[in-house]
Amino acid sequence: MALLTVKNLAIGYDSGVVAKDLNFEVNAGDYLCITGENGSGKSTLMKTLLGLSEKLGGEIIFGDGLKKTEVGYLPQQTMIQRDFPASVKEIVLSGAQAGMGFRPFYNAREKERARISMEKMGISDLAGRCYRELSGGQQQRVLLARALLAADKILFLDEPVSGLDPDATIKMYELIKMLNREGMAIVMISHDVREVKKYASHILHFGDEVSFEKRKEMAICG
Ligand SMILES: Nc1ncnc2c1ncn2[C@@H]1O[C@H](COP(=O)(O)OP(=O)(O)OP(=O)(O)O)[C@@H](O)[C@H]1O
Ligand SMILES: [Mg+2]
């Protein structure tokens, strides 16, 4: 069964429908890129899939034993978030909160996962630094490490390279590709259509009509 199946989904707000008739699947090892103009509904779709925004109709089915707390999410950045006054380690650890319930402290397993996650993202040496004093590229790697803490099978990334310079962008894409090669399914929003075609196994494009395309020439990594 697919990790995620979307059937006839309609998304939007009380003010109206943003997109409808959305149909697609995400399977283990997939790399789905969501592209489209500003305001077309990409972030709304991601928030709806994560249960952070209410769907207006249709179905979202999590399969393959996937629980909502096992999903990693890197939200679209705002300037206010870039100024967050906490240490890198605290921010990465906070990625465990969805799975903690009412328990007030992080346990040893979560702390170990945070250590591994920071190591993978190459930010171990930044652990004690204040988040708001980091460069944009470093901040995005911190947020990716945070998202990784919760994710066992699937990662949702909303414009993870926005505001990054070309080098930091390539580095970020390489990190995401590495996670995908290790078996993590990726659902990523990006404006960078040319670049994402190099990586994506599937593309969901928001235009006048929404299209879902499998890129046949690419091997799907496992
Ligand atoms: N909380 C909200 N309440 C009402 N309308 C909203 C809300 N958030 C977004 N919208 C509207 O829904 C539409 C889709 O917004 P969304 O943020 O999903 O676009 P997007 O494709 O992610 O754009 P961008 O590329 O700029 O990030 C827009 O018209 C936006 O104004
Ligand atoms: Mg958006």
Image (spheres, rainbow, N blue to C red):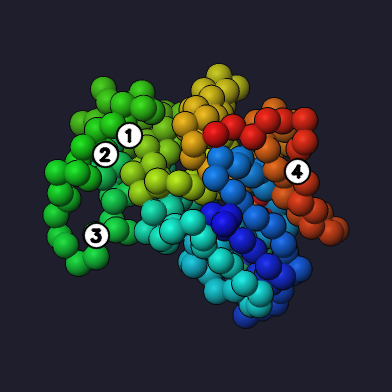
Q: Residue at x 32, y 34 (%)?
A: 117
**Residue 26: % across, % down:** 61, 51
Mark closer to the observer (4, 2): 4
Query: In the rendered structure, are the residues bearing label 4 and label 3 in contact, judged by CB atoms less than 8 Å apart?
Result: no
Q: Residue at x 40, y 47 (%)?
A: 151
Q: Residues within 10 Å of mark 4 (few under 14, many from 20)?
A: few
Farthest-out residue, bottom:
14
**Residue 218: % across, % down:** 72, 30
Quarter holding the C terminus? Answer: top right
Residue at the spot of label 3 = 100
Query: Residue 113, which numbered label?
Result: 2
Residue at the spot of label 4 = 214
Q: Nearer the viewer, residue 83 or 24?
A: 24
C-alpha distance separating marks 4 and 2: 33 Å
Q: Is mark 3 within 8 Å of ligand 1?
A: no
Q: Nearer the viewer, residue 138 or 101?
A: 101
**Residue type at numbered disc 3:** Met
C-alpha distance separating marks 1 and 2: 6 Å
C-alpha distance separating marks 4 and 3: 36 Å
Farthest-out residue, front:
1
User: Quarter of the image holding residue 45?
Assistant: bottom right
Residue at the spot of label 1 = 117
C-alpha distance separating marks 1 and 4: 30 Å
**Residue 59: % across, % down:** 62, 72
At mark 3, the secondary structure is: loop
Query: In the rendered structure, are the residues bearing label 1 and label 4 in contact, judged by CB atoms less than 8 Å apart?
Result: no
Figure quadrant, ligand 1? bottom right
At mark 1, the secondary structure is: helix
C-alpha distance separating marks 3 and 1: 18 Å
